[in-house]
Amino acid sequence: MIEGFDKAPPEVDRFGRRALVVGVAGMALCILPALLSAGLREQFFRSYLLSFVFWIGITLGCFAILMVQHMSGGAWGLVIRRVLESATRTFPLLALLFLPIILGVHSLYIWARPEDVAASEALRHKSAYLNVTFFVARAVFYFAVWFSVSRALNKWSLEQDKTGERKLTSKMQNLCGPGLLLYGLTVTFASIDWVMSLQPEWFSTIYGILFMGGQGLSAMAFVIAVIVLLASRKPMSDVIQPGHLHDLGKLMLAFLMLWAYFAFSQFLIVWSGNLPEETPWYVRRLQSSWKYVGLALVLVHFALPFVLLLSRDLKRNSRRLVIVASLVIVMRFVDLIWMIVPEVRGGGFAIHWMDVVMSFAIGGIWLSVFLRQLGNRPLLPLRDPEIDAAFSHAGGH
């Protein structure tokens, strides 16, 4: 093993401890008012759902990119594999963090309230699927799939670190094909269960794909931010070169275009179809002050990063690339606000302070576990058969 890569820089551990403090403090700041006020209790669950969906989206995006990397190979994936794997090892934490959503299901979802179901023929028709027992059972299945596949990949990757056996590469590749299929199915149904069913009388056939595109974009932006921070210190400063950043920047651009294509496709299909059961979702957003958020998504979430990422020099400059990645991460949260908040809070544009604080609360807790996992293993898969290509990759760009 190359000296120095068996442990993360000490700053990783320090940042993890600080993130945990921020997370716990933010959670306490949200929980205490919720215990004292019924109105704030409702808001707590709404803000919690928004933040949970954002952070599990980063994790699921890392999970998908990890499987794509195993199947496709390439030096670009070897330098970020440990970051991706560390994110997937947070699934047990996320399963635990899902419990408040179960506790708040009656506050969040109209289909979970018997009196509302009794008053709506559409809800009664969908009650075989949209009911609390089946909702929880499906969530257990989703987490079981994600945990099982990610656990196997992490286990075999760790074994490869110890033994260097080439057959482990084939085992991981063989699992990732079915794993990606399961990812697509589970994320589709999870997005329907957790977000689309906030308005159970509305539906979109492209909803799951839109979430998958957003998760891939969120994850790639997050990975770039982590890699740039690691590259500023040894030992990763000896490995990460402009060529690696260039590849990661191109991938972020690809995910950005993919997300924009899915988002516009949904809008075009719904708006041109002009069906009364579909268009109210956009009418609610485009005929109120929410339209300015939609405009910001077009200009700041897509157009600005798209133009910037066309520059080869920017993609090879760590400082500029991490600024674009940070912008994308922020706008991914704004996109989820656009998708979730109008469904749980009627009227014009409004952001509650809990929406922001809860994102730091769940994010701080998640980051502390992620960084601890990152420090538990070598920063590179040094016995992977293709690792030499990762070290020499930068010289070819």
Image (tube, rainbow, N blue to C red):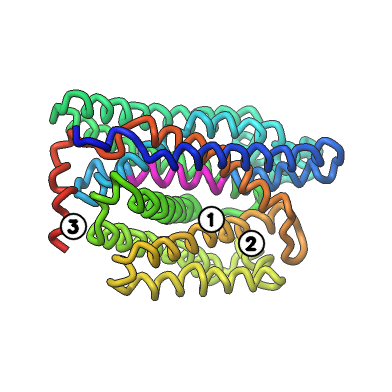
Q: How many marks?
A: 3
Judge whether 218 appears above or below 136 on screen: below
Residue tagged by mark 3?
A: 394
Q: CA distance from mark 3 to mark 2?
A: 47 Å
Q: Nearer the viewer, residue 248 or 209?
A: 248
- Asked whether disc 1 touches disc 2, contact meaning CB atoms under 8 Å apart, the reply is yes
The stretch of residues the image draws in magenta is 53-65
Q: Quadrant of residue 364?
A: top right
Q: Relative to residue 185, is residue 331 depicted above or below?
A: below
Q: Amino acid at mark 1?
A: Ser
Tag 2 or tag 3, which sits nearer the N-term?
A: 2
Q: Which residue is mark 2?
A: 281
Residue 200 at what x, y percent from top left? 65, 48
Instruction: Tell whether position 42 is magenta.
Output: no
* Residue closest to the eye, 57 or 191: 57
Q: Is residue 198 left or right of residue 297?
A: right
Q: Residue at x 20, y 46 (%)?
A: 73
Of residues 371 and 156, the one drawn nearer to the viewer in this rendering: 371
Q: Which mark is residue 204?
A: 1
- In the image, what residue occupies the spot 27% across and 62% down? 246
Q: Which tag is nearer the camera, tag 1 or tag 3?
A: 3
Numbered mark located on residue 56 in the image: none
Q: Earlier in the sequence, mark 1 or mark 2?
A: 1
Helix, strand or loop at mark 1: loop
Residue type indicated by callout 3: Ala
Residue 76 versus residue 102 in the image, above or below: below
Tag 3 near tag 2, CB within 8 Å: no
Looking at marks 1 and 3 on the same chain, the residue that comes earlier in the sequence is marked by 1
Left or right of 393, for residue 158: right
Q: Residue 79, how many percent across, how many down?
A: 27, 46
Q: Where is residue 67? Give x, y as percent.
A: 30, 41
